[in-house]
Image: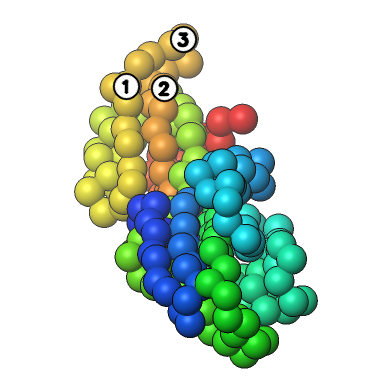
Amino acid sequence: MAHRTVRAAASHEEVVSGSRFIGYVVEVEDVEAAAIHLAGVRAAHPAATHHCWAHRVGPAQRFSDDGEPGGTAGRPMLEVILKRDLDHVSAVVVRYFGGRKLGAGGLVRAYSGTLAKALDAAGVRDVVDVAGVTVRAPFAHTDTVLRLLADAAQKTAPFDLSAPTFDAGGLVVRLSVPEEALAALSAALREATNGAASLEVDV
C-alpha cells in the first residue's frame, strides 16, 4: 500500500541539562534493515549511555528504552512516528549522560523532541506502490491499445512503459503502474478492445 516515509536520512543533536542527545532517522525496507540501522548507530557511539530506538515497518511497531525508565524513551519516540503517519522508518536516539537526572517527563521531552527535530530535517515523501504488469492484445487492436497506454502514461505517475513487442498471439507490452490505478486501466483496456485485451500482474 502507499505510505509516507522520510525523504532522506537525517540526524539532530541537542544538549538537555548536560546530557547529549543525538537522533538518527532513516527509511528502511524491512525490520532487518532497521536492526542494521540500530547496529550501525551503536557502532558509531559505543560510549553512549543509552541507544533508544523505535521503528515502524508496516504492521511491525517496536521500540526499546534501552535502560531508561520504562515508557520514557522508546514509546514516546514511536508515538512521534505514528503521529506523523510515517511508515518504513527506523529511529535511534543515543544519550550521553551529563550527570543530571531529567525525571520521567524530562526524558520523554528530550527523546521525543530530539526525534521530532531529526524528522523535521529528514522531510517527508509519499511512496506509491507500483506493480509490474503485462498487457496482451490481438494484432488488430495494436494501435488502440498503444494509444490508450500512451494516454494513461501522461495522466498517471509513476507509469513506465516498455517498447512494445509481438508474439504469436499479438501485441505484448510490459509496464509498471501504481497499484491503485490497475483496476481502472484494466477496465479501460477491456472496454476499448471489447474484452480482447488482457492485463496480468507479474508475479
Of residues 104 and 158, the one drawn nearer to the viewer in this rendering: 104
Residue 161 vs residue 64: left or right? left
> Is 57 on the left or on the right of 149, as rendered?
right
| Viewport quadrant of the C terminus | top right
From the image, tell me which residue sits under label 1: 164
| Residue 179: x %, y % from top left | 50, 50
Counting residues from the N terminus, which is met first, the one under dot 1 or under dot 2? 1
For the N terminus, give its image quadrant.
bottom right
Q: Are marks 3 and 1 in contact (CB under 8 Å)?
A: no
Q: Residue 141 falls in which quadrant of the image?
A: top left
Q: Which mark is residue 35?
A: none
Numbered circle sitting on residue 168? 3
Disc 2 marks a residue whose amino acid type is: Val
**Quick one: SS at disc 3?**
loop
Instruction: Residue 6 in the image: state x and y as whole percent.
Output: 42, 59
168 is higher (above) or lower (below) than 66: above
- The span from disc 3 to disc 1 (Cα, nearest Å) is 14 Å
- For marks 3 and 1, give the one nearer the viewer: 1
Q: Amino acid at mark 1?
A: Pro
Q: Which residue is mark 2?
A: 172
Can residue 74 be seen from the camera position used here?
yes
Type of amino acid under label 3: Ala
Q: x, y percentage for residue 89?
A: 53, 57
